[in-house]
Image (cartoon, rainbow, N blue to C red):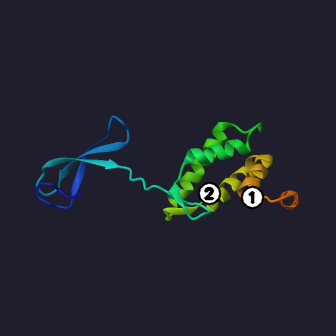
Amino acid sequence: MKCPYCGYDESKVIDSRPTDEGERIRRRRECLKCGKRFTTYEVIETVPIIVIKKDKSRESFDRNKLLNGLLRACEKRPVSIDTLERVVDEIEGSLQNSLDREVPSSLIGKYAMEKLKTIDEVAYVRFASVYREFKDIATFKEELDRMMKARRD
């Protein structure tokens, strides 16, 4: 950290504590050259995730939208809201950790389907029917056949 008094690049941290809101860290530093003390604040930088929809339009990632989709798929199923919130957290974490700031909606849907497949197969099929836009009963049956084959293997 550069000293605001002499411009030297090296300092040591004397004290470190969270601010009242807990969203920033306040650090007291001491310059290793001139010995003067100064305060810095550390803030987590969040870069918004932009979702590229099927029609090529763009919008900010909305975790509530994803959670609502999962809730609809899990309606009347034995899946807790805590489980679904954890799934949304994991998906959002994966998106934040990727280097891409713009992600296709299909990737988010793919992540959600992977998670649902391990949690509840009925919810998975419900979600897949909307996500993959099943056109008829034959498409639905193909997905069920794939699931049954995967279960046997």
Q: Which callout, 2 or 1, points to the residue nearer the camera?
A: 1
Q: Which residue is at 24% across, 57% downward?
A: 1
Residue farthest toward the top in the current orientation of the protein: 20
Q: Is residue 87 left or right of residue 43?
A: right
Classify mark 2: residues with Cα within 10 Å, few (<14), some (14-19) or many (20+). Answer: some
Q: Can you give x and y, in whole percent of width and height, for residue 16 in the image?
A: 30, 43
Q: Which residue is at 72% across, 39% downward?
A: 79
- Please tell me which residue lies in front, 124 or 57: 57
Q: Can you give x and y, in whole percent of width and height, for residue 114 in the image?
A: 70, 56
Q: Which residue is mark 2?
A: 108
Q: Which residue is at 71% across, 56% downward?
A: 131
Q: Which residue is at 88% across, 60% downward?
A: 138
* Dot 1 amino acid type: Glu
Classify mark 1: residues with Cα within 10 Å, few (<14), some (14-19) or many (20+). Answer: few
Q: Where is 133 relative to 75, above or below?
A: below
Q: Is residue 139 left or right of residue 86?
A: right
Which badge, 2 or 1, comes first in the chain's sequence?
Answer: 2
* Dot 2 amino acid type: Ile
Q: CA distance from mark 2 to mark 1?
A: 15 Å
What's the mark number on residue 3? none
The answer to which image quadrant residue 64 occupies is: top right
Local secondary structure at mark 1:
loop
Q: Which residue is mark 1?
A: 133
- Please tell me which residue lies in front, 16 or 137: 137
Q: Can you give x and y, in whole percent of width and height, for residue 128 in the image?
A: 75, 55
- The quarter of the picture where the C terminus appears is bottom right
Local secondary structure at mark 2:
helix
Q: Can you give x and y, in whole percent of width and height, for residue 137 in the image?
A: 87, 57
Q: Is residue 29 visible to the viewer in this orientation of the structure? A: yes
Q: Where is 116 relative to 141, above or below?
A: above
Q: Is residue 114 left or right of residue 28?
A: right
